[in-house]
Each structure stands twice: as structure tokens, then as C-alpha cells.
Image (tube, rainbow, N blue to C red):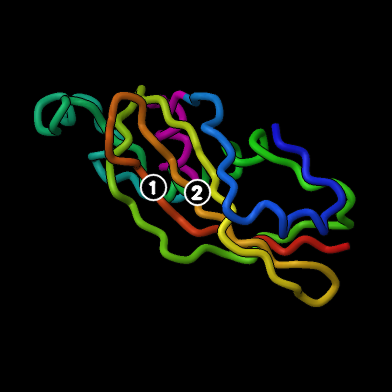
Amino acid sequence: MLIIEPPSRLADMVGTTVGPGEWLTVDQRMIDAFAELTGDRQWIHVDTKRAAREMPGGKTIAHGFLVLALLGRLMPPLYDVRGTSRVLNYGSDRLRFLNVVSAGARVRATIAFKAVEPAPGGRKCVTETTIEVEGQTKPALVAESIFLYFD
């Protein structure tokens, strides 16, 4: 894990890439729980029998927004900014779902620091996060994530 301390050192990270992180298995239980939570029960996500017959690879696929939500789990082990009073997720830009994540696939994240600029009470940091799928050349997701780090 990369430790950034104090927060003013964030600017030094621009151009730096961190990761890849550890693999995380996206299993059917996780997909089903996300479907239940969001109400998105489209068969491509939850009907394993139909997927076996009709989906390429014969498996269900994770929701794109589940893969996006996994950023909250995949990013924190990669770096930590210490000495902040709080951190706010400011949003995402240039979000693209480029490849499916089949049930049982493993994913991991890599983060590239793109920009850091002053913001009221602290700084705004833009990173580009890529979630790769084990054994695939095309990533599942690429997104710019924006966080506000307060002094």
C-alpha cells in the first residue's frame, strides 16, 4: 500500500500508477445480492440455467454498476492519504464498461494519479481507475474518480 502523508504530497503523485491490487472473485452470491438490492434482476445476471444455455461462456454476468461499486472495495488497499480530516467521493468522469465480468471471474484494480488541484479546505484529486478481469486483455471498467481531501 502506498502511504501519502501529508496530504500536500498528493500533487507529487501525478503521473504515478499504483497497483495492480489483489484479486477479488465476483461470485454468483455477490451478483444475486446486488440484484436484490437494486431490483435489477435481468436474467443475464441471475438466471444461471438460462445463462448456461444462452450466454457466451455459459455464465451469468455481473451488473456494470456492481463492478463500479467494487471500486469502494478495490481502491482502499492500494493507497491511503493520511492526515486528512475527511475524504469525500466527488464523482466519476469518463466511465466506460468495456468488458463483462462473468460469475466466478476475478477482478483487480490499478490506479493512475491524473491531476491534483487546490479545492476549498484541501485538494481535489483525479485518478483513473482500471478494473481488469483475470485472463482478459480488455478491462471491465475504466473510470476517472474524483475525491476531495480536506486538511
Q: Depth check: 91 or 139 in front?
A: 139
> Around disc 1, counting alpha carbons within 10 Å, would you say few (fewer than 14), some (14 to 19), or many (20 or more)?
many
* Mark 1 / mark 2, whichever is N-terminal: 2
Q: Which residues are magenta?
A: 25-37
* The image quarter in which residue 71 lies: top right
Above-or-below relation of 117 to 51: below
Instruction: Write the residue at 59% across / 47% down.
Output: 16
Q: Tell me the SS state at disc 2.
A: strand
Residue at the spot of label 1: 141
Q: Residue furthest left?
A: 53
Tell me the CA gap for discs 1 and 2.
8 Å
Give the image location of residue 77, x and y in percent.
66, 33
Q: Quadrant of the N terminus?
A: top right
Q: Which mark is residue 114?
A: none
Q: 15 left or right of 12? A: left
Residue at 83% x, 63% y: name it: 150
| Vertical order, 134 against 96 (above or below) | above
Q: Position of residue 89 (x, y in %)?
A: 66, 60
x then y, percent, for residue 70: 52, 41
Q: Amino acid at mark 2?
A: Thr
Q: Position of residue 21 (x, y in %)?
A: 55, 30
Q: Are marks 1 and 2 in contact (CB under 8 Å)?
A: yes
The quadrant the C terminus occupies is: bottom right
